[in-house]
Amino acid sequence: MMRGKIALEEAFNTPEIAEASKKATGDTYIDPARIPDYEHRIVDILDTRLKDKDTYGIGYTILSHTVPGVQGIADKAEAEKTATHVNDYIADKIKNHRNRFGAFATLSMHDPKQAGEELRRVVTKYGFHGALLNDIQHSGPDGDDLLYYDQPEYDAFWKVVCELDVPIYIHPAAPQGTLYEKQYKNRDYLIGPPLSFANGVSLHLLGLVSNGVFDRFPKLQIIVGHLGEHIPFDIWRIHHWFEDIEKPRGMVAKKTLKEYFDQNIWITTSGHFSTATLNYCISQVGVDRILFSVDYPYESMSDACNWYDHKTEMGTVNKLKIGRENAKKLFKLKDYHDSDAPLEIDHI
Protein backbone atom coordinates (compact mmCIF):
# COMPACT_ATOMS: atom_id res chain seq x y z
CA MET A 1 0.00 0.00 0.00
CA MET A 2 1.04 3.58 -0.60
CA ARG A 3 0.19 5.83 2.32
CA GLY A 4 0.14 9.60 2.12
CA LYS A 5 -1.54 9.79 -1.27
CA ILE A 6 -3.03 13.16 -2.23
CA ALA A 7 -6.49 13.20 -3.84
CA LEU A 8 -7.89 16.34 -5.44
CA GLU A 9 -11.13 15.65 -7.30
CA GLU A 10 -13.15 14.90 -4.22
CA ALA A 11 -16.65 16.34 -4.00
CA PHE A 12 -18.81 17.60 -1.17
CA ASN A 13 -22.09 19.44 -0.86
CA THR A 14 -23.75 21.51 1.82
CA PRO A 15 -26.77 19.80 3.40
CA GLU A 16 -29.28 22.38 2.14
CA ILE A 17 -28.01 22.38 -1.46
CA ALA A 18 -27.81 18.59 -1.45
CA GLU A 19 -31.43 18.35 -0.32
CA ALA A 20 -32.62 20.81 -2.96
CA SER A 21 -30.78 19.07 -5.81
CA LYS A 22 -30.90 15.41 -4.84
CA LYS A 23 -33.45 14.33 -7.46
CA ALA A 24 -31.49 15.86 -10.33
CA THR A 25 -28.22 14.39 -9.06
CA GLY A 26 -29.71 10.95 -8.46
CA ASP A 27 -31.35 10.87 -11.88
CA THR A 28 -28.10 11.77 -13.65
CA TYR A 29 -25.13 10.23 -11.85
CA ILE A 30 -26.07 7.57 -9.29
CA ASP A 31 -27.00 3.90 -9.44
CA PRO A 32 -30.50 3.90 -7.85
CA ALA A 33 -29.40 1.26 -5.35
CA ARG A 34 -26.60 3.56 -4.18
CA ILE A 35 -28.62 6.74 -3.67
CA PRO A 36 -28.96 6.53 0.16
CA ASP A 37 -25.23 5.83 0.50
CA TYR A 38 -24.37 8.69 -1.87
CA GLU A 39 -26.64 11.11 -0.01
CA HIS A 40 -24.70 10.37 3.16
CA ARG A 41 -21.25 10.52 1.60
CA ILE A 42 -21.66 13.78 -0.35
CA VAL A 43 -22.36 15.81 2.81
CA ASP A 44 -20.10 13.84 5.16
CA ILE A 45 -16.62 15.25 5.70
CA LEU A 46 -15.25 13.97 9.02
CA ASP A 47 -16.91 10.57 9.52
CA THR A 48 -17.07 7.94 6.77
CA ARG A 49 -14.85 9.95 4.43
CA LEU A 50 -12.07 10.24 7.01
CA LYS A 51 -12.30 6.56 7.96
CA ASP A 52 -12.03 5.54 4.30
CA LYS A 53 -9.03 7.82 3.84
CA ASP A 54 -7.28 6.04 6.73
CA THR A 55 -8.19 2.60 5.38
CA TYR A 56 -6.94 3.27 1.86
CA GLY A 57 -3.93 5.45 2.52
CA ILE A 58 -5.08 8.90 1.44
CA GLY A 59 -3.19 11.38 3.56
CA TYR A 60 -4.54 14.64 2.17
CA THR A 61 -7.74 15.51 0.30
CA ILE A 62 -8.56 18.75 -1.52
CA LEU A 63 -12.33 19.12 -1.38
CA SER A 64 -14.48 20.84 -4.01
CA HIS A 65 -18.15 21.69 -4.41
CA THR A 66 -19.96 19.09 -6.49
CA VAL A 67 -21.60 19.51 -9.89
CA PRO A 68 -23.23 21.60 -11.19
CA GLY A 69 -22.26 23.89 -8.35
CA VAL A 70 -22.34 27.62 -8.91
CA GLN A 71 -21.67 27.20 -12.63
CA GLY A 72 -25.25 25.98 -12.98
CA ILE A 73 -26.73 29.13 -11.39
CA ALA A 74 -27.66 31.58 -14.15
CA ASP A 75 -28.49 34.50 -11.84
CA LYS A 76 -25.33 36.48 -11.08
CA ALA A 77 -26.27 37.69 -7.60
CA GLU A 78 -27.44 34.26 -6.48
CA ALA A 79 -24.32 32.60 -7.88
CA GLU A 80 -21.99 35.00 -6.06
CA LYS A 81 -23.88 34.66 -2.78
CA THR A 82 -23.87 30.86 -3.04
CA ALA A 83 -20.15 30.72 -3.80
CA THR A 84 -19.31 32.80 -0.74
CA HIS A 85 -21.56 30.65 1.45
CA VAL A 86 -20.04 27.38 0.19
CA ASN A 87 -16.49 28.66 0.69
CA ASP A 88 -17.16 29.81 4.23
CA TYR A 89 -18.98 26.55 4.99
CA ILE A 90 -16.18 24.22 3.93
CA ALA A 91 -13.49 26.41 5.49
CA ASP A 92 -15.27 26.08 8.84
CA LYS A 93 -15.73 22.30 8.45
CA ILE A 94 -12.04 21.59 7.85
CA LYS A 95 -10.41 24.30 9.98
CA ASN A 96 -9.37 21.86 12.73
CA HIS A 97 -8.23 19.16 10.30
CA ARG A 98 -5.83 20.94 7.98
CA ASN A 99 -3.30 18.12 8.06
CA ARG A 100 -5.96 15.96 6.36
CA PHE A 101 -8.05 18.36 4.26
CA GLY A 102 -7.73 21.42 2.06
CA ALA A 103 -10.23 22.94 -0.35
CA PHE A 104 -10.65 24.45 -3.78
CA ALA A 105 -12.62 27.67 -3.99
CA THR A 106 -16.13 27.70 -5.41
CA LEU A 107 -16.49 30.70 -7.72
CA SER A 108 -19.20 32.44 -9.67
CA MET A 109 -17.73 33.14 -13.09
CA HIS A 110 -20.34 35.69 -14.19
CA ASP A 111 -17.97 38.57 -13.46
CA PRO A 112 -14.24 37.84 -13.92
CA LYS A 113 -13.23 40.66 -11.56
CA GLN A 114 -15.52 39.46 -8.77
CA ALA A 115 -14.33 35.86 -9.30
CA GLY A 116 -10.76 37.02 -8.83
CA GLU A 117 -11.67 38.93 -5.69
CA GLU A 118 -13.39 35.92 -4.14
CA LEU A 119 -10.47 33.68 -5.07
CA ARG A 120 -8.04 36.10 -3.47
CA ARG A 121 -10.20 36.23 -0.33
CA VAL A 122 -10.30 32.49 0.25
CA VAL A 123 -6.69 31.82 -0.71
CA THR A 124 -5.38 34.51 1.63
CA LYS A 125 -7.93 34.04 4.45
CA TYR A 126 -8.40 30.26 4.42
CA GLY A 127 -5.37 28.90 2.59
CA PHE A 128 -7.44 27.34 -0.21
CA HIS A 129 -5.40 25.65 -2.93
CA GLY A 130 -6.92 27.38 -5.98
CA ALA A 131 -10.37 26.80 -7.43
CA LEU A 132 -12.41 24.12 -9.13
CA LEU A 133 -14.80 25.32 -11.83
CA ASN A 134 -17.59 23.06 -13.01
CA ASP A 135 -16.93 23.88 -16.67
CA ILE A 136 -18.83 26.77 -18.31
CA GLN A 137 -20.83 29.38 -16.41
CA HIS A 138 -24.52 29.38 -17.32
CA SER A 139 -25.95 32.87 -17.55
CA GLY A 140 -28.86 34.85 -18.99
CA PRO A 141 -32.59 34.77 -18.27
CA ASP A 142 -32.98 31.15 -19.41
CA GLY A 143 -29.48 29.95 -18.50
CA ASP A 144 -28.56 29.44 -22.14
CA ASP A 145 -25.83 32.08 -22.30
CA LEU A 146 -22.66 29.99 -21.95
CA LEU A 147 -19.60 31.79 -20.59
CA TYR A 148 -16.23 30.30 -21.55
CA TYR A 149 -13.09 31.48 -19.80
CA ASP A 150 -10.94 31.56 -22.95
CA GLN A 151 -12.27 34.98 -23.91
CA PRO A 152 -10.32 38.24 -23.36
CA GLU A 153 -12.67 39.52 -20.66
CA TYR A 154 -11.49 36.68 -18.42
CA ASP A 155 -7.90 37.91 -18.50
CA ALA A 156 -8.72 39.89 -15.35
CA PHE A 157 -9.43 36.59 -13.60
CA TRP A 158 -6.38 34.75 -14.95
CA LYS A 159 -4.18 37.65 -13.85
CA VAL A 160 -5.27 37.16 -10.24
CA VAL A 161 -4.82 33.38 -10.50
CA CYS A 162 -1.21 33.87 -11.61
CA GLU A 163 -0.55 36.50 -8.95
CA LEU A 164 -1.75 34.06 -6.29
CA ASP A 165 0.22 31.23 -7.95
CA VAL A 166 -2.53 28.64 -7.53
CA PRO A 167 -3.94 26.14 -10.05
CA ILE A 168 -7.46 25.97 -11.46
CA TYR A 169 -9.21 22.64 -11.90
CA ILE A 170 -11.72 22.54 -14.78
CA HIS A 171 -14.26 19.86 -13.94
CA PRO A 172 -17.15 18.70 -16.15
CA ALA A 173 -20.84 19.32 -15.60
CA ALA A 174 -23.90 17.80 -17.22
CA PRO A 175 -25.39 19.69 -20.18
CA GLN A 176 -28.48 21.72 -19.36
CA GLY A 177 -30.94 23.95 -21.17
CA THR A 178 -30.71 24.13 -24.96
CA LEU A 179 -27.44 22.21 -24.98
CA TYR A 180 -29.24 19.29 -23.34
CA GLU A 181 -32.31 19.59 -25.56
CA LYS A 182 -30.37 19.69 -28.83
CA GLN A 183 -27.67 17.11 -28.13
CA TYR A 184 -28.45 14.82 -25.23
CA LYS A 185 -32.22 14.67 -24.68
CA ASN A 186 -32.49 11.53 -26.81
CA ARG A 187 -29.07 10.25 -25.69
CA ASP A 188 -29.55 10.44 -21.95
CA TYR A 189 -27.17 7.60 -21.13
CA LEU A 190 -24.25 9.48 -22.70
CA ILE A 191 -24.47 12.26 -20.11
CA GLY A 192 -21.57 12.29 -17.72
CA PRO A 193 -18.53 9.98 -17.89
CA PRO A 194 -19.66 8.03 -20.98
CA LEU A 195 -19.24 11.08 -23.25
CA SER A 196 -20.55 14.53 -22.32
CA PHE A 197 -17.99 15.22 -19.59
CA ALA A 198 -15.01 14.74 -21.88
CA ASN A 199 -16.67 16.64 -24.73
CA GLY A 200 -17.31 19.68 -22.54
CA VAL A 201 -13.96 19.96 -20.79
CA SER A 202 -11.85 19.12 -23.84
CA LEU A 203 -13.59 21.94 -25.75
CA HIS A 204 -12.93 24.35 -22.89
CA LEU A 205 -9.29 23.35 -22.38
CA LEU A 206 -8.44 23.42 -26.08
CA GLY A 207 -10.15 26.81 -26.24
CA LEU A 208 -7.70 28.09 -23.61
CA VAL A 209 -4.87 26.74 -25.78
CA SER A 210 -6.06 27.91 -29.19
CA ASN A 211 -7.18 31.35 -28.00
CA GLY A 212 -3.79 32.11 -26.49
CA VAL A 213 -4.62 32.19 -22.77
CA PHE A 214 -1.48 30.26 -21.83
CA ASP A 215 0.62 32.60 -23.96
CA ARG A 216 -0.76 35.65 -22.18
CA PHE A 217 -0.35 33.89 -18.80
CA PRO A 218 2.58 31.49 -19.13
CA LYS A 219 2.60 30.71 -15.38
CA LEU A 220 -1.03 29.53 -15.46
CA GLN A 221 -1.59 25.94 -14.27
CA ILE A 222 -4.78 24.10 -15.28
CA ILE A 223 -5.82 20.65 -14.05
CA VAL A 224 -8.31 18.36 -15.79
CA GLY A 225 -9.45 14.97 -14.58
CA HIS A 226 -10.27 11.54 -15.92
CA LEU A 227 -6.83 11.07 -17.47
CA GLY A 228 -7.17 14.13 -19.65
CA GLU A 229 -10.78 14.02 -20.90
CA HIS A 230 -9.77 12.10 -24.06
CA ILE A 231 -7.21 14.69 -25.20
CA PRO A 232 -4.09 12.52 -24.65
CA PHE A 233 -5.47 9.99 -27.13
CA ASP A 234 -5.75 12.65 -29.82
CA ILE A 235 -2.52 14.53 -29.14
CA TRP A 236 -0.86 13.59 -32.42
CA ARG A 237 -3.89 14.54 -34.51
CA ILE A 238 -4.56 17.79 -32.65
CA HIS A 239 -0.88 18.73 -32.87
CA HIS A 240 -0.83 17.99 -36.61
CA TRP A 241 -3.86 20.16 -37.31
CA PHE A 242 -2.81 22.98 -35.00
CA GLU A 243 0.67 23.21 -36.52
CA ASP A 244 -0.05 22.42 -40.17
CA ILE A 245 -3.52 23.87 -40.72
CA GLU A 246 -4.81 26.08 -37.89
CA LYS A 247 -1.70 28.22 -37.31
CA PRO A 248 -1.41 29.05 -41.04
CA ARG A 249 -5.12 29.97 -40.84
CA GLY A 250 -4.38 32.42 -38.02
CA MET A 251 -4.59 30.51 -34.72
CA VAL A 252 -2.77 32.65 -32.16
CA ALA A 253 -1.30 29.90 -29.93
CA LYS A 254 2.49 30.25 -30.03
CA LYS A 255 3.61 26.89 -28.66
CA THR A 256 2.85 23.28 -29.50
CA LEU A 257 0.18 21.32 -27.66
CA LYS A 258 2.90 19.16 -26.09
CA GLU A 259 4.63 22.28 -24.75
CA TYR A 260 1.40 23.41 -23.08
CA PHE A 261 1.07 19.98 -21.47
CA ASP A 262 4.69 20.20 -20.32
CA GLN A 263 4.33 23.70 -18.89
CA ASN A 264 0.67 24.45 -18.07
CA ILE A 265 -1.59 21.39 -18.01
CA TRP A 266 -1.96 18.57 -15.49
CA ILE A 267 -4.20 15.50 -15.63
CA THR A 268 -5.50 13.29 -12.83
CA THR A 269 -6.47 9.65 -12.52
CA SER A 270 -9.91 10.54 -11.16
CA GLY A 271 -12.55 7.97 -12.10
CA HIS A 272 -10.28 6.26 -14.64
CA PHE A 273 -8.65 3.24 -13.04
CA SER A 274 -7.09 1.58 -16.07
CA THR A 275 -3.42 0.58 -16.01
CA ALA A 276 -3.19 0.44 -19.81
CA THR A 277 -4.68 3.93 -20.09
CA LEU A 278 -2.39 5.34 -17.41
CA ASN A 279 0.65 3.84 -19.14
CA TYR A 280 -0.42 5.44 -22.41
CA CYS A 281 -0.92 8.83 -20.77
CA ILE A 282 2.53 8.61 -19.21
CA SER A 283 3.93 8.01 -22.69
CA GLN A 284 2.11 11.06 -24.08
CA VAL A 285 2.20 13.73 -21.35
CA GLY A 286 4.88 12.41 -19.01
CA VAL A 287 4.81 11.11 -15.45
CA ASP A 288 5.59 14.56 -14.03
CA ARG A 289 2.22 16.00 -15.15
CA ILE A 290 -0.07 13.30 -13.73
CA LEU A 291 -1.75 13.38 -10.30
CA PHE A 292 -3.60 10.70 -8.35
CA SER A 293 -7.29 11.31 -7.58
CA VAL A 294 -10.43 9.32 -6.84
CA ASP A 295 -13.60 11.23 -7.90
CA TYR A 296 -15.24 10.46 -4.56
CA PRO A 297 -18.09 9.82 -3.82
CA TYR A 298 -19.05 9.10 -7.43
CA GLU A 299 -16.26 6.52 -7.42
CA SER A 300 -15.02 4.62 -4.37
CA MET A 301 -11.74 5.03 -2.56
CA SER A 302 -11.44 1.26 -2.46
CA ASP A 303 -11.56 0.94 -6.26
CA ALA A 304 -9.19 3.85 -6.83
CA CYS A 305 -6.64 2.94 -4.18
CA ASN A 306 -6.62 -0.83 -4.67
CA TRP A 307 -5.98 -0.21 -8.36
CA TYR A 308 -3.31 2.42 -7.84
CA ASP A 309 -1.54 0.65 -4.98
CA HIS A 310 -1.58 -2.90 -6.34
CA LYS A 311 -2.30 -2.99 -10.09
CA THR A 312 -0.38 -0.14 -11.69
CA GLU A 313 2.89 -0.94 -13.43
CA MET A 314 5.39 1.60 -12.11
CA GLY A 315 8.59 1.67 -10.15
CA THR A 316 8.81 3.31 -6.74
CA VAL A 317 9.86 6.75 -8.01
CA ASN A 318 6.99 7.12 -10.47
CA LYS A 319 4.42 5.69 -8.08
CA LEU A 320 5.42 8.25 -5.48
CA LYS A 321 5.40 11.04 -8.08
CA ILE A 322 1.84 10.42 -9.26
CA GLY A 323 0.59 9.40 -5.83
CA ARG A 324 1.82 12.47 -3.96
CA GLU A 325 5.12 14.09 -4.95
CA ASN A 326 3.81 15.90 -8.05
CA ALA A 327 0.91 17.29 -6.03
CA LYS A 328 3.23 18.33 -3.22
CA LYS A 329 5.16 20.48 -5.68
CA LEU A 330 2.09 21.91 -7.43
CA PHE A 331 0.28 22.84 -4.21
CA LYS A 332 3.43 23.57 -2.17
CA LEU A 333 2.39 21.03 0.45
CA LYS A 334 4.83 20.10 3.18
CA ASP A 335 3.75 18.31 6.33
CA TYR A 336 0.42 16.50 6.30
CA HIS A 337 -0.75 13.09 7.52
CA ASP A 338 1.64 10.39 6.23
CA SER A 339 3.28 12.92 3.92
CA ASP A 340 6.58 11.01 3.94
CA ALA A 341 5.34 7.49 4.63
CA PRO A 342 7.51 4.85 2.93
CA LEU A 343 6.03 2.94 0.03
CA GLU A 344 5.06 -0.58 1.09
CA ILE A 345 6.06 -3.02 -1.65
CA ASP A 346 3.70 -5.83 -2.56
CA HIS A 347 5.22 -9.28 -2.10
CA ILE A 348 3.87 -12.03 -4.35
Image: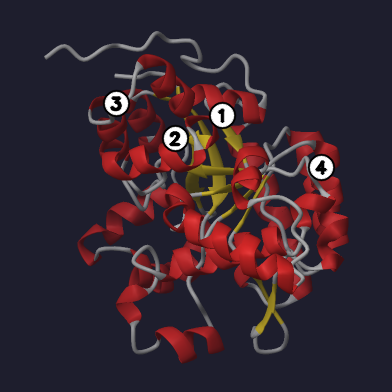
Q: What is the x, y in percent for residue 205?
A: 61, 59
Q: Is residue 284 left or right of residue 139?
A: left
Q: Residue at x 59, y 24 (%)?
A: 328
How many numbered marks are there? 4
Q: Are marks 3 and 4 in contact (CB under 8 Å)?
A: no
Q: Is residue 30 above or below residue 87?
A: below
Mark 1 Cα-neighbour bin, 10 Å: few <14, some 14–19, many ≥20: many
Upstream in sequence: badge 1 or badge 2: 2
Q: CA distance from mark 1 to mark 4?
A: 18 Å
* Quarter-of-image position of residue 30: bottom left
Upstream in sequence: badge 1 or badge 4: 4
Upstream in sequence: badge 4 or badge 2: 4
Residue pointed to by mark 2: 292
Q: Look at label 4 and name its amino acid.
A: Cys
Q: Are marks 1 and 2 in contact (CB under 8 Å)?
A: yes
Residue pointed to by mark 4: 162
Residue pointed to by mark 1: 327
Where, quadrant-wise, is the N terminus in this rendering? top left
Q: Look at label 2 and name its amino acid.
A: Phe
Q: Residue at x 25, y 31 (%)?
A: 306
Residue pointed to by mark 3: 309
Upstream in sequence: badge 2 or badge 3: 2
Q: Are marks 1 and 3 in contact (CB under 8 Å)?
A: no
Q: Is residue 303 left or right of residue 53?
A: left
Mark 2: secondary structure: loop
Q: What is the x, y in percent for residue 217?
A: 81, 48
Q: Is residue 22 left or right of residue 335?
A: left
Residue 71 in sight from this viewpoint = yes
Q: Residue at x 71, y 65 (%)?
A: 247
Q: What is the x, y in percent for residue 94?
A: 59, 33
Foreground: 85 or 125?
Answer: 125
Q: CA distance from mark 2 to mark 3?
A: 11 Å
